[in-house]
Image (cartoon, helix red, strand yellow):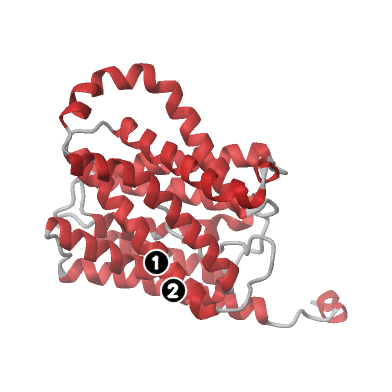
Amino acid sequence: MTPADNGRPRFGAPAARGPMLGVLLLVLSMWTLSCLDASGKWVMSAGVPLLVLSWFRYAVHLLLVLALVLPMRGLRILRSNKPREQIIRGGSMFLATLMFFTTLSYIPQAEATAINFLAPLLVLSAAPWILKEPARLSRFIAAGVAFIGVVIVIRPGGGLHPVGTIFGLITACCFAVQFIATRRVAGDDPFTSLIWSGAVGTALLTLTLPFILPPALPVLQALSPLDWALLISTGITGGLGHLFQIAAYRRAPASTLAPFIYLQIISATSVGWLVWGHFPDALTWLGIAIICASGICIGAVEWRRSRAPAAPLADAGAR
């Protein structure tokens, strides 16, 4: 699962017609990625080791994307203008996957997803130093308010496992690094980035197969057909979820889609309730609402700022 970045670049070409279709595709991607999270949590509860699960998630993702993209775009789609940044992006996505699946093994899906929404606001807060963007007080306030929401969600006595909470916060940091790396490879085709992210994770995990596969064979042999279907589906839902996101951002501006990103908490809660019967309590919902409101508000502020006319040079020099 990857929460969408509020500061996501538009990936080169301007958004095409069909903003409503873009919104629908984004919502579809949220549900698809929530199914990925639920499937991963399910097969881990069946005993599948984390690294084996992650290998299936990335290997199937890579094969699916290559099968869908290569016939349309050819081998040139594999070429990146910034291979080092693509490797960093793929590595951070890989680490985020490991951390998030670990988080899901300790805490419910809705709360884990809510903590992830801290990541885009971490990016906005770090932007002046890492991305050389102007420092904005509004960004720091939004990040601070969102952190208050996260504290409410992970509060002592809230029933969340402390180890899962720690891994959830680490996941948010990994996603923040991934979002920053995504901005640095904005010049590449989004399908190139999608292929590289799958390839980096697959390559790293394939190197570990001689060590992780033999101990896991008894567990894999004991899996039911449903368990196998869910294990393989992690790569399908992961690949399709990101493809839907790319299609969404090609059909609607990022500013239009930003508020709908937070609908993922609805899909995560719904899937968690349907599969495990877990539903957050009222205080947890308050924290989730604070996180989402903070993200939506700073998104609106950034959108208005981007549409404001630039100051004349004479005025700029007089300040």
Q: Is residue 316 above or below residue 151?
A: below
Give left or right: position of 127 versus 168. Answer: right
Q: Is residue 112 above or below residue 100?
A: below
Report whether residue 181 is seen: no
Give left or right: position of 278 versus 166. Answer: left
Which residue lies under the disc numbered 2? Answer: 24
**Residue count near mark 2 (Cα–Cα under 10 Å), binned few <14, some 14–19, many ≥20:** some
Q: Residue 252 at what x, y percent from top left?
A: 57, 74
Rendering quarter of residue 109: bottom left
Which residue lies under the disc numbered 1? Answer: 28
Q: Residue 16 at what x, y percent from top left?
A: 63, 74
Amino acid type for the residue under numbered disc 2: Leu
Q: Is residue 181 above or below residue 256?
A: above
| Residue 295 numbered tag | none
In whole angstroms, how far apart are the C-alphas of marks 2 and 1? 6 Å
Residue in the picture at 65% in, 36% down: 84
Q: Residue 304 at what x, y percent from top left?
A: 60, 81
Q: Please, what secondary structure does the residue beneath circle 1 have?
A: helix
Amino acid type for the residue under numbered disc 1: Leu
Residue in the picture at 36% in, 36% down: 56
Q: Please, what secondary structure does the residue beneath circle 2 have?
A: helix
